[in-house]
């Protein structure tokens, strides 16, 4: 179970780096680790009229491919359903976007509009 704990710490560290990056780039963090019946969204952030649902993928190397390659169709569907759940009962006028932030030894790569519903 030590590996699972180490991976959890790595992911949490990556999410922290991503949140700091977003704040530095003018985003307001609305929520971290938003949970709902469909799953969890790592970060929900706003900038201007955009509300971004952001999946953070952290890696220590490329042995398993680029981090964004891990966000396959099933995970995209969960994020889309989480966004729908987030908006249920709320009236908001904004552009919804699904981003991926890759965090690795080289830094941060923010992929805006990584996928769409």
Image (spheres, helix red, strand yellow):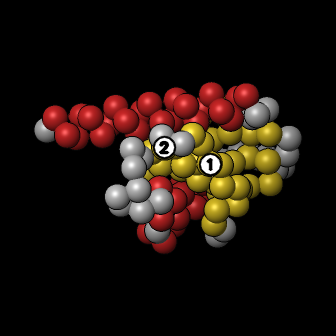
Q: Is residue 20 above or below residue 109?
A: above
Task: State which quadrant residue 117 falls in.
Answer: bottom right
* Element type at mark 2: strand
Q: Earlier in the sequence, mark 2 or mark 1?
A: 2
> How packed is label 2: few (under 14 Cα within 10 Å), some, or many (20 or more)?
some
Residue drawn 79% across the image and 32% down it: 26
Task: State which quadrant residue 106 falls in.
Answer: top right
Name the residue that disc number 1 marks: 109
Residue drawn 85% across the image and 45% down it: 49
| Image quarter of the N terminus | top left
> How packed is label 1: few (under 14 Cα within 10 Å), some, or many (20 or more)?
some
Q: Inspect this view and state whether residue 13 appears.
A: yes
Dots 2 and 1: beta carbons under 8 Å?
A: yes
Q: Nearer the viewer, residue 24 or 48?
A: 24
Name the residue that disc number 2 marks: 104
Q: Is residue 98 above or below residue 89?
A: below
- Residue 89 at x, y percent in the picture: 66, 47
Residue drawn 40% across the image and 38% down it: 11
* Element type at mark 1: strand
Q: Nearer the viewer, residue 44 or 104?
A: 104
Q: Inspect this view and state whether residue 78 appears.
A: no
- Residue 112 at x, y percent in the picture: 70, 55
Mark identifier at residue 52: none
Residue drawn 22% across the image and 40% down it: 4
Task: State which quadrant residue 79 falls in.
Answer: bottom right
- Residue 99 at x, y percent in the picture: 64, 54
**Residue found farthest to the front:** 106
- Residue 28 at x, y percent in the picture: 73, 31
Mark 2 vs mark 1, CA separation in Å: 9 Å
Q: Nearer the viewer, residue 43 or 12?
A: 12
| Left-right relation of 68 to 112 | left
């Amino acid at each position: 179970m030590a590996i699972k704990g180490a991976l959890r710490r790595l992911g949490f560290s990556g999410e922290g780096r991503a949140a700091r990056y977003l704040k530095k780039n003018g985003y307001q963090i609305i929520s971290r680790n938003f949970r709902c019946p469909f799953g969890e969204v790592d970060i929900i952030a706003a900038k201007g009229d955009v509300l971004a649902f952001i999946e953070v993928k952290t890696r220590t190397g490329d042995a398993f491919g680029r981090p964004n390659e891990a966000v396959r169709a099933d995970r995209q569907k969960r994020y889309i359903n989480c966004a729908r759940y987030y908006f249920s009962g709320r009236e908001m006028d904004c552009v919804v976007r699904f981003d991926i932030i890759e965090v690795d030894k080289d830094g941060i790569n923010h992929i805006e509009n990584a996928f769409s519903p």
